[in-house]
Image: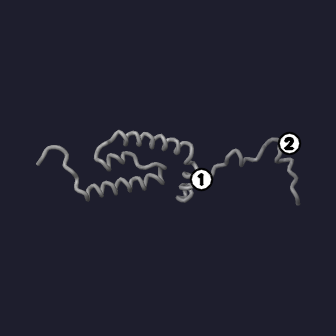
Amino acid sequence: MRRGKLKQFVPVQIADSMWANHGDDISIPYSGTPALKGDFVRCGHRTALGVLADGCNALTRYYLNNFVDGTKQDAVDLLQGHYIPAISRDMKPSSQKGSIETKIVQCP
């Protein structure tokens, strides 16, 4: 047997590509970005372009998780039965006398 890396059979390459694509398909709805380290699964080793893409994906995930995904998480919690509604400042009645809420005239 020769020294060095053996070439993979075509069915193995197809399976690796399908595996990586499946990982991306699962990751995109969950995190908003493709799976990390996809270059390793597809090529068998890390590439410079893959490391750069993973860095961009990590920054995108950080932004989405901290600034955008709140309502998406609330929807997931609601569908799973774990949603606990919180009272925000907008929902609290005003306790100040003479506020706009006390000046509204209610019709009978």
**Which residue is more in the foreground, 94 or 31?**
31
Return the x and y of residue 74 as percentages of the image width and height: 57, 52
Residue 50 marker: none
Quadrant of the rendering where the C terminus is positioned = bottom right
Give, as a three-letter code, the residue at label 2: Gly
Q: Earlier in the sequence, mark 1 or mark 2?
A: 1
Give the secondary structure at mark 1: loop
Return the x and y of residue 20 as percentages of the image width and height: 36, 53
Q: Is residue 24 left or right of residue 97?
A: left
Q: Is residue 39 above or below residue 79?
A: above
The picture quadrant where one finds residue 45 is top left
Residue 84 marker: 1
Q: Residue at x 32, y 46 (%)?
A: 40
Q: Is residue 104 above or below residue 11?
A: above
Q: Residue at x 47, y 40 (%)?
A: 59
* Number of residues whose C-alpha sits closer than 10 Å to that of mark 2, classed few (under 14), some (14–19) or many (20 or more): few
* Circle 1/circle 2 CB separation < 8 Å: no
Q: Is residue 91 above or below residue 81?
A: above
Q: Is residue 9 left or right of residue 76?
A: left
Return the x and y of residue 91 as percentages of the image width and height: 71, 49
Q: Residue at x 36, y 48 (%)?
A: 38
- Look at the image and name its color scheme: one colour
Give the secondary structure at mark 2: loop
Return the x and y of residue 14 as percentages of the image width and height: 30, 57
Real-space CA distance between mark 1 and mark 2, rounded to the nearest whole angstrom = 33 Å
**Which residue is more in the foreground, 31 or 42?**
42
Q: Residue furthest left?
A: 1
Give, as a three-letter code, the residue at label 1: Ile
Q: Which residue is mark 2?
A: 98
Q: Residue at x 86, y 47 (%)?
A: 103
**Which residue is more in the foreground, 70 or 108?**
70
* Number of residues whose C-alpha sits closer than 10 Å to that of mark 1, classed few (under 14), some (14–19) or many (20 or more): few
